[in-house]
Image: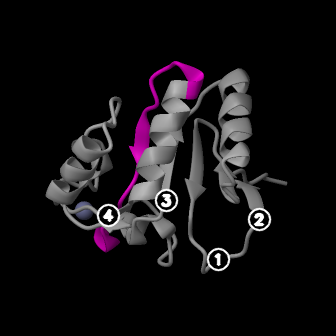
């Protein structure tokens, strides 16, 4: 279910008894107050939080089109359609645990950044895929 406002996200969090995330965390980081988020991402994050027993920090969830442009996202980004989240991840052990968990939940699109893990539910894009954000200078 695609949640389309902060109120809808708050309602979902309350209804499903999501303990570790607040609606604020899913809003566009530009301050526009907008949000779009597939509720399945929230339940996956909560289950991940329970599984790793550590805070899960969302670095990017919904991005409005102008913010997406500013942060250099591709225009078709799953973030602009509420289908993606990035979470902070700065060590190899957590990266392993996060990936294992996401794969066990059937998440089929994962991107590995230097200090984050992206995952999305964009079924308009190829899957299964695991990619990275490194560009070697040769
Ligand atoms: Zn925005």
Residue 105: x percent and y percent? 66, 48
Q: Nearer the viewer, mark 2 or mark 4?
A: 2
Q: Neighbour class for label 1 at 10 Å: few (<14), some, many (≥20)?
A: few
Based on the displayed image, in which of its 4 quarters is residue 106 positioned? bottom right
Q: Residue furthest top?
A: 53
User: For numbered disc 4, what is the local secondary structure?
Assistant: helix
Q: Neighbour class for label 2 at 10 Å: few (<14), some, many (≥20)?
A: few
Q: CA distance from mark 2 to mark 4?
A: 27 Å
Task: Tell me the magenta residue range.
Answer: 51-66
Q: Is the CB atom of the residue marked by disc 4 within 8 angstroms of ligand 1's nearest atom?
A: yes
Q: CA distance from mark 4 to mark 3?
A: 15 Å
Q: Which residue is mark 3?
A: 84
Tell me: 31 left or right of 89: left
Q: Which residue is mark 4?
A: 67
Q: Which mark is residue 28?
A: none
Q: Residue at x 46, y 30 (%)?
A: 56
Q: Earlier in the sequence, mark 2 or mark 4?
A: 4
Q: Which residue is mark 1?
A: 125
Q: Nearer the viewer, mark 1 or mark 4?
A: 1
């Amino acid at each position: 279910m695609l949640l389309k406002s902060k109120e809808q996200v708050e309602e979902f969090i309350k209804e499903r008894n999501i303990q570790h995330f607040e609606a604020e965390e899913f809003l566009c980081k530009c301050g526009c107050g907008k949000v779009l988020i597939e509720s399945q991402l929230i339940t996956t994050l909560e289950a991940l939080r329970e599984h790793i027993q550590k805070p899960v920090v969302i670095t990017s969830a919904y991005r409005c089109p102008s913010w997406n442009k500013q942060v250099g996202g591709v225009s078709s980004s799953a973030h602009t359609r509420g289908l993606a989240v990035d979470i902070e991840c700065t060590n190899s052990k957590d990266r392993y645990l996060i990936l294992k968990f996401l794969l066990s939940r059937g998440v089929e699109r994962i991107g590995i950044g230097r200090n984050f893990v992206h995952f999305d539910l964009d079924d308009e894009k190829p899957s299964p895929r695991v990619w990275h954000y490194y560009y070697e200078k040769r």
